[in-house]
């Protein structure tokens, strides 16, 4: 008989997110400097994000790059905008990109709107461990909205919340 492991979830009432997030610091800073709100995104930059996240080869059609460039420059776009869904759907269908990679790409382009969906951050937020095959657009948008709400409640930038939850899970929940 197997027992389902209980994971500790972040309690915003009684805990703080005050970890030092450190992951490939030089490359992370370089990608943020180059891609945050950039309107000249190329496939090579997406490859760089891909390598930052995990060592894999990707191929993105030029039409998807055009939509990414447009997405980067629309100031008040929302998660529910049809362009967001279109870009996410196209990224996920591209070679070498799934939801975690697509969310990484989007975070570097628009950290004010898109968090990275990661097993650790998701688990710290919800108490459940997602599996690769369970990711979908609806789950990602719901997750992004929860993190956006948490960022507002904690008066922290959205770009930090997924990183903080990642660290929280690493400290409190151990191995993936």
Image (cartoon, rainbow, N blue to C red):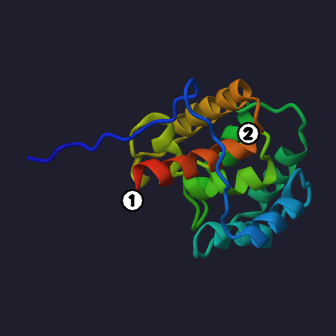
x and y percentages locating residue 64 in the rendered image:
74, 56
What secondary structure is found at the residue carrying circle 2? Answer: helix
In the foreground, 44 or 176? 176
- Please count the marks in the image: 2
Q: Is residue 130 left or right of residue 95?
A: left
Residue positioned most to the left = 1
Q: Residue at x 82, y 33 (%)?
A: 77
Q: Is residue 168 left or right of residue 75?
A: left
Q: Name the quadrant containing residue 80.
A: top right
Residue 120 drawn above or below residue 45: above
Q: Which residue is mark 2?
A: 158
What secondary structure is found at the residue carrying circle 1? Answer: loop
Q: Residue at x 58, y 74 (%)?
A: 56
Q: Is residue 166 left or right of residue 23?
A: left
Q: CA distance from mark 2 to mark 1?
A: 25 Å
Given this view, does label 2 or label 1 mark the residue nearer the observer? 1
Q: Which mark is residue 175?
A: 1
Q: Residues within 10 Å of mark 2 (few under 14, many from 20)?
A: many
x and y percentages locating residue 148 in the rendered image:
69, 31
């Amino acid at each position: 008989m197997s027992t389902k492991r209980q994971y500790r979830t972040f309690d915003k009432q009684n805990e703080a997110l005050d970890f030092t997030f450190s992951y490939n610091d030089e490359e992370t800073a370089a990608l943020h400097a180059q891609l945050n709100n950039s309107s000249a995104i190329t496939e090579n930059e997406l490859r760089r994000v891909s390598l930052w996240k995990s060592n894999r080869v990707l191929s993105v059609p030029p039409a998807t790059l055009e939509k990414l460039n447009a997405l980067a420059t629309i100031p008040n776009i929302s998660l529910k905008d049809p362009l967001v869904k279109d870009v996410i759907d196209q990224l996920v269908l591209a070679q070498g990109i799934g939801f975690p990679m697509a969310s990484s790409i989007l975070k570097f382009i628009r950290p004010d709107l898109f968090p990275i969906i990661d097993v650790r951050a998701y688990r710290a937020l919800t108490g459940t461990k997602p599996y690769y095959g369970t990711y979908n657009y609806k789950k990602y948008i719901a997750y992004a909205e929860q993190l956006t709400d948490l960022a507002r409640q904690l008066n922290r930038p959205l770009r930090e919340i997924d990183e903080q939850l990642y660290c929280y899970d690493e400290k409190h929940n151990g191995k993936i």
